[in-house]
Image (cartoon, rainbow, N blue to C red):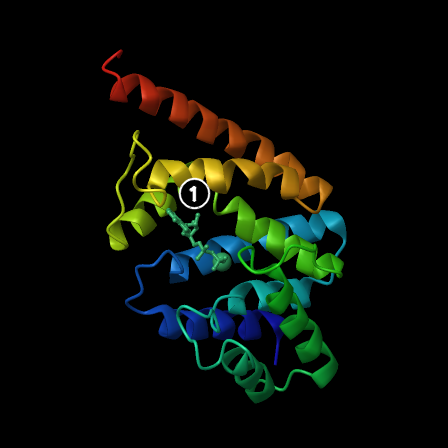
């Protein structure tokens, strides 16, 4: 199968998996991570096919979406096997997917391909898109947008400080670090404006 056809099949597969999800792990998140990972991988000289497939399949076995297959990565593996991908590449893709989750792993991925996909996934959590996703997540979980008294530690603004503002220093690749600079600034500018409006200053 031509790579282009295979990539399209992986996109179509992700679309069927995420139909109707509003937790922030939606189909368009997958497409954005794919596009970013591709750009990063190209500059970094990583194996493009492994990066593209891992990016497109990185959330199809997410523990919140598909708890039964989260450990085995069965959805991703079955997709790859049914499209004739060699076992060696399947193992590498599964390793990448396993290593990129930012809530579970503290060590950086041990392959360049994993580092590219993790950077892409993290970049999609910051910048304008990251802000939109944060409030979408907060809304779907009944969280406050902001809780100045700190009674709701899960508030969306708290999430900026707990996680989002830390991501720029966790980028693995030079390209990821470069792309994170502007997205990080977007977060800081947003927080500053938010606070001023909250206080009725502007
Ligand atoms: P992963 O499963 O890849 O580790 P998460 O499920 O933690 O990622 O995050 C998915 C999206 O939801 C991200 O954009 C993240 O910033 C956002 N998010 C996660 N936790 C919170 C929270 N407590 N409040 C607001 N947004 C959140
Ligand atoms: Ni993701």
Residue receiving disc 1? 130
Indicate whether 34 appears above or below 168: below
Q: Residue at x 52, y 35 (%)?
A: 165
Q: Which of the 4 image quadrants contains residue 77?
A: bottom right
Looking at the picture, how far across and down is residue 95, in whole percent? 67, 71
Q: In the rendered view, does 174 fall on the left or right side of 199? A: right
State which quarter of the image contains the N terminus.
Answer: bottom right
**Closest to the observer: 65 or 39?**
65
Seen in the image, is 44 located left or right of residue 152? right
Q: Is residue 165 left or right of residue 15?
A: right
Q: Is residue 68 above or below residue 145?
A: below
Q: Residue at x 71, y 45 (%)?
A: 173
Is 29 in front, or is 61?
A: 61
Does the image show residue 127? no
Relative to 143, residue 23 above or below: below
Q: Residue at x 48, y 66 (%)?
A: 59
Task: List x then y, in percent, for residue 14.
Answer: 44, 70
Residue 131 location (% of width, % of height): 39, 39
Which quarter of the image is occupied by the C terminus?
top left
User: Does label 1 point to a residue whose CB lies under 8 Å from ligand 1?
Assistant: yes
Callout 1 secondary element = helix
């Amino acid at each position: 199968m031509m790579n282009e056809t295979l990539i399209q099949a992986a996109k179509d597969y992700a679309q069927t998996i995420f139909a109707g999800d509003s937790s922030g792990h939606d189909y368009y998140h997958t497409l954005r991570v794919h596009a970013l990972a591709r750009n990063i991988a190209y500059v970094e000289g990583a194996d493009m096919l492994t990066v593209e497939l891992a990016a497109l399949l990185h959330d199809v076995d997410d523990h919140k979406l598909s708890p039964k297959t989260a450990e085995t990565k069965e959805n991703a593996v079955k997709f790859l096997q049914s499209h004739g991908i060699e076992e060696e590449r399947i193992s590498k893709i599964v390793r990448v997917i396993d290593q990129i989750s930012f809530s579970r792993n503290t060590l950086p991925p041990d392959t360049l391909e994993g580092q590219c996909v993790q950077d892409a996934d993290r970049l999609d959590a910051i910048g304008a898109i990251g802000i939109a996703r944060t409030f979408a997540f907060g809304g779907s979980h009944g969280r406050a947008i902001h809780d100045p008294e700190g009674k709701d530690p899960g508030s969306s603004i708290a999430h900026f400080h707990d996680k989002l503002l830390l991501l720029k220093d966790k980028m693995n690749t030079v390209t990821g670090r470069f792309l994170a600079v502007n997205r990080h600034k977007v977060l800081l500018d947003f927080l500053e404006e938010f606070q001023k409006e909250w206080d009725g200053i502007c």
